[in-house]
Amino acid sequence: MNDLTRWVEQNWPDIVVPLAVFLTTYIAGLWIRRVFLNRFGRWLKNTNWQGSAIVLNALRTPFVHWFLILGIYLALRVSMLPIAWVVIAGRVLGSLLVISIIVPGVIIAEQLISLYFGRIGLAPREIALSRNVSRGALLVIGLLIILDIWALPTTPIILIVGAVILWGAFAFRDILPNLIAGMQFSATNQIKVGDYIKLETGEEGYVTDISWRNIRIESLEEHSSIIVPNRKLTTSTVINYGRPLTQAKEPFHFYSRLHLKELTGLKARDLKELVDVMKNIPESVVYYHTHHYLEEHHFLTPEPSNDFALWVTNALGYDALGEKLASVDVLDFPTLAAFKERIMSVVEEALTNGDSSRTALHGREFYFIKTVSVIIPTNFVAHDLREFVEILRKISIGSIYFHIFESRLRLQKGQNDFSIWIEDSVGDAELAGSIARLDPYFHTLEGLRSTLIQLLEKRIK
């Protein structure tokens, strides 16, 4: 006992100094751990990153281990132990430090993989495989570092790992780019389920599913599904219109029509016969002689005059009367019957007040033709204004013609189908009124399409 006391009295600095270094380092480490975790936690909270809790929980205990190892190492460095012992102890501590870093790294990697791969629809088997791959990669890295600390050869392991990586890269060459892209979408929320997207290659629709390989888009046409590889979305221009708008009470079904011409066998050689025949003709005849030019010359604006005005001017030579008939705007009348009555009253006034003896030459009589319409349903259905405007871009001009012109006059709705649906089902009376106030007769059908799209785009933005 006296020998031990005497040894302590003689060598107390060699004991106290390393112990003081160890305690100082450990206490400082606890303080640094507290400050770092608090600030790091606040930063992660501000970023709204869902993996923040995983990282914080995994780093709390290893922080203590790291400063414990650091304190022991510094104490050994200032101690009077033989250098050989210090070197061996340093290698042991270095190995422990590597293990204390790899273990939380494995935990963080596995939990993040489960979080994000589960969100992108990866199957449990693929998630487990990904976790095993990440665990194996980190363990191999830790092993290589430990071997290097102990100055052991690492070349064989590096060659084996390199061969495995090359094999994996070849085997999964088509999967990895899609997987990485899927992780990017999941992390950044650039594209989410429910968004309406449009690719530069033409594919468009609502995103219904995002998996680890591809994105599924429901096209508006025939409600078909389009499968797009994730990597294609990262290498091409994608327009994301965002979430769908408020659903309409009733969806809008787009129709088209096919017009057939049918001779009535009726004809007129002068103004009196023109009025007499018009008294008994159906509205389908009036419709043909006021609207067939829209189909045959839909690229012209303003529109040509109605057939009655053209015949009176060209076949009978009544220029003034022809101008009066041409000035009768079909848009001013709610029905074709009212329009017909106005045309007849103008002609009857001319019969009363002027020369009505002119007769058309043989072959230039006015031949009454009627329109036979066949309504054709399309596969396009709109549930909100976004779907409506995207369908409007691709439907035929025949469908636009049907919903704008036919619904107003022949169907006697007073307004076009678009305005009625937007007001009644969507509830946007202002937009419906803007479309209703358009004069379709002063637009080409393609021009009318463009004007409608501009009004709708301005509204939904």
Image (spheres, grey):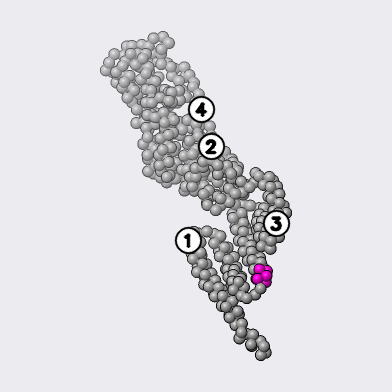
Q: Position of residue 325 (x, y in %)?
A: 33, 22
Q: Amino acid at mark 3?
A: Thr
Distance, label 4 to label 2, CA atoms, is 28 Å
Q: Amino acid at mark 2?
A: Gly
- Residue ID for mark 2: 202
Distance, label 1 to label 2, CA atoms, is 38 Å
Q: Secondary structure at mark 1?
A: helix
Q: Which residues are magenta?
A: 83-89
Dot 2: few (<14), some (14–19), or many (≥20) neighbours within 10 Å? few
- Counting residues from the start of the chain, the first of labels 4 and 3 encountered is 3
Q: Position of residue 141 (x, y in %)?
A: 66, 58
357, above or below 252, in the image:
above
352, above or below 78, in the image:
above
Q: Quadrant of the C terminus?
A: top left
The image quarter in which residue 342 lies: top left
Distance, label 4 to label 3, CA atoms, is 79 Å
- Counting residues from the start of the chain, the first of labels 3 and 2 encountered is 3
Distance, label 4 to label 1, CA atoms, is 61 Å
The image quarter in which residue 304 lies: top left
How many labels sit on residues? Answer: 4
The image quarter in which residue 151 lies: bottom right
Q: Position of residue 5 (x, y in %)?
A: 64, 88
- Counting residues from the start of the chain, the first of labels 4 and 1 encountered is 1
Dot 1: few (<14), some (14–19), or many (≥20) neighbours within 10 Å? few
Q: Mark 1 touching mark 2, by CB under 8 A? A: no
Residue appearing at x 37%, y 35% in the figure: 438
Q: Secondary structure at mark 4?
A: strand
- Residue ID for mark 1: 46
Q: Amino acid at mark 4?
A: Leu
- Residue ID for mark 4: 258
Distance, label 3 to label 1, CA atoms, is 42 Å
